[in-house]
Image (cartoon, grey):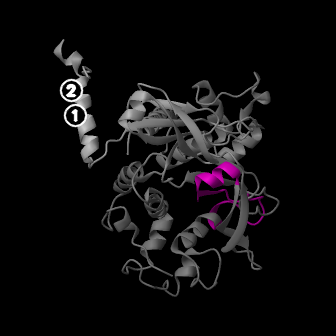
């Protein structure tokens, strides 16, 4: 599923974000679609999970896209650190 | 219908202002939001908080809620006789079988959007599925129970239990999300079917720990196996293999068994790391004690030599 691309319209409807919000989040570097013109944008399906999280956070905390981008960046850092902690814990004796 | 005290859920008194309601919601949402929180039962707690806020933030819904009266949380109750006519767009249906949250959701739906004409997309579902390492390796099938929305003969949308079986492909990992397109709730008036999102959660394994597609196995070795080297048998998910312990191995050292980890989706596999620990017999026989004492006398090895510098 990581390699499958979904077109903009489907990404919009499946994520729960509006077209304008997606465009703004792409500008902030949250999503990286393939294609240059907006009409040709396609998104890896694996990015949909992040988009749905973004939609939930936006709705539940009434966040503006710029704040959302910041929250998502910190969330990604926390997840990366958790992955790293998990990997290091795997090496410890029980 | 069971009564829920939305004010108590938000930790507020009945006369709370709109600002107090919003602040209480934000505080609790930050604590329990399932995308951010590590609290146990965060998802359930957040649903309760959101349900309370959805009703209390809307002046009309809040008035409708307050005019239901006040009961103990969980107490069975019925709305006053004129309540339905004053607030519900649905007419005089029996409200006995529905949940309080559905009652208030239907108020909003009926008020706003021309509910019976527009295409309504099916609901997306997100379900956490717990499977074992073996099942993740081979792929498996799981049975799920969803409460989907169905349109009754009177045009009213009700929750109906639906059982489905879904195939989980080989090679999934812990915390992975799978999207099963069109496997969520049915759409209405020509709306597309919703999607089903599966969050994969692996059961802890008694021997192996998982990091992505790699497995970690703690392998205790004796002091002489670590010092002299040895060939030992270790378990993998697909059977035992022989592994070479190099002479002079240390505790905490990782030895890689390439391709003996979890299967990856496109055929390759992660690695199995054997993490060495040095095990010492807790009770020594007379001859063992003697040999260790001989070793102590003969050896000039000092593992703490760097402390002196």
Q: Are marks 2 and 1 in contact (CB under 8 Å)?
A: yes
Q: Quadrant of residue B66?
A: bottom left
At 52% from the left edge and 88% from the top edge, which residue is drawn?
Answer: B81
A41 or B196: nearer the eye? B196
**Disc 1 target residue:** B293
Tag 2, which secondary structure?
A: helix
Q: Is residue B243 shown in magenta?
A: no
The answer to whether tags 2 and 1 share a subunit is: yes
Sort mark 1 into few (<14), some (14-19) or many (20+) by Cα contacts within 10 Å.
few
Task: Give the residue drawn at x 58%, y 56%.
Answer: B132
Q: Is residue B161 above or below residue B174?
A: below
Q: Position of residue B148 (x, y in %)?
A: 68, 68
Q: Residue at x 39, y 72 (%)?
A: B5
| Circle on res. B96 | none
Residue B37, image x and y in percent?
A: 42, 49
Look at mark 2 in the image and give the residue it sits on.
B297
Name the foreground residue: B74 vs B259. B259
Give neighbour class at mark 2: few <14, some 14-19, many 20+ (Cα, 10 Å).
Answer: few
Quadrant of the frame with the C terminus of chain B: top left
Tell me if residue B302 can be seen: yes
- List x then y, in percent, for residue B186: 75, 63
Is residue B119 covered in magenta?
yes
Towards the viewer: B296 or A55: B296
| Chain letter of the residue beneath label 1 in the structure image | B
* Residue nearest the viewer, comparing B252 with A61: B252
Q: Secondary structure at mark 1?
A: helix
Q: Is residue B196 above or below residue B144?
A: above
Q: Chain of mark 2?
A: B
Where are the magenta residues, as a range? Answer: B110-139
> Alpha-carbon distance for marks 2 and 1?
6 Å
């Amino acid at each position: 599923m990581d390699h499958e691309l979904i077109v903009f319209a489907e990404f919009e409807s499946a994520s729960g974000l509006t077209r304008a919000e997606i465009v703004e989040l792409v500008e902030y570097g949250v999503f990286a679609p393939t294609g240059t013109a907006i009409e040709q944008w396609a998104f890896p399906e694996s990015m949909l999970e992040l988009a749905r999280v973004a939609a939930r956070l936006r709705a539940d905390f009434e966040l503006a896209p710029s704040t959302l981008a910041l929250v998502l960046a910190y969330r990604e850092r926390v997840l990366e650190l958790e992955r790293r902690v998990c990997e290091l814990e795997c090496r410890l004796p029980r | 219908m069971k009564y829920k005290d939305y004010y108590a859920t938000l930790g507020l008194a009945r006369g709370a202002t709109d600002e107090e309601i919003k602040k209480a919601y934000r505080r609790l949402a930050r604590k329990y939001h399932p995308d951010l929180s590590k609290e146990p039962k965060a998802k359930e707690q957040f649903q309760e908080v959101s349900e309370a806020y959805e009703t209390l933030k809307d002046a009309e819904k809040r008035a409708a809620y307050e005019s239901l009266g006040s009961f103990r949380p969980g107490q069975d109750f019925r709305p006053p006789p004129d309540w339905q006519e004053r607030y519900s767009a649905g007419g005089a249906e029996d409200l006995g079988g529905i949940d309080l949250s559905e009652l208030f959701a239907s108020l909003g739906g009926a008020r706003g959007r021309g509910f019976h004409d527009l295409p309504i997309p099916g609901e997306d579902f997100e379900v956490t599925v717990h499977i074992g390492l073996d099942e993740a390796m081979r792929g498996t099938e799981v049975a799920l129970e969803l409460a989907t929305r169905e349109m009754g003969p009177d045009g009213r949308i009700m929750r109906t239990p639906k059982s489905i079986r879904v195939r989980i492909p080989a090679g999934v990992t812990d915390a992975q999300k799978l999207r099963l397109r069109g496997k969520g709730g049915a759409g209405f008036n020509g709306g597309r079917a919703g999607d089903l999102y599966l969050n994969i959660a692996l059961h802890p394994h008694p021997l192996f720990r998982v990091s992505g597609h790699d497995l970690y196995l703690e392998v205790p070795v004796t002091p002489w196996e670590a010092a002299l080297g040895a060939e030992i048998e270790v378990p993998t998910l697909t059977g035992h293999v022989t592994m070479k312990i190099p002479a002079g191995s240390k505790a905490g050292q990782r030895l890689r068994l390439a391709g003996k980890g979890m299967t990856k989706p496109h055929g390759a596999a992660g690695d199995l790391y054997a993490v060495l620990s040095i095990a010492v017999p807790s009770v020594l026989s007379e001859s063992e004690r003697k040999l260790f004492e001989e070793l102590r006398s003969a050896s000039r090895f000092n593992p703490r030599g760097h402390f002196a510098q």
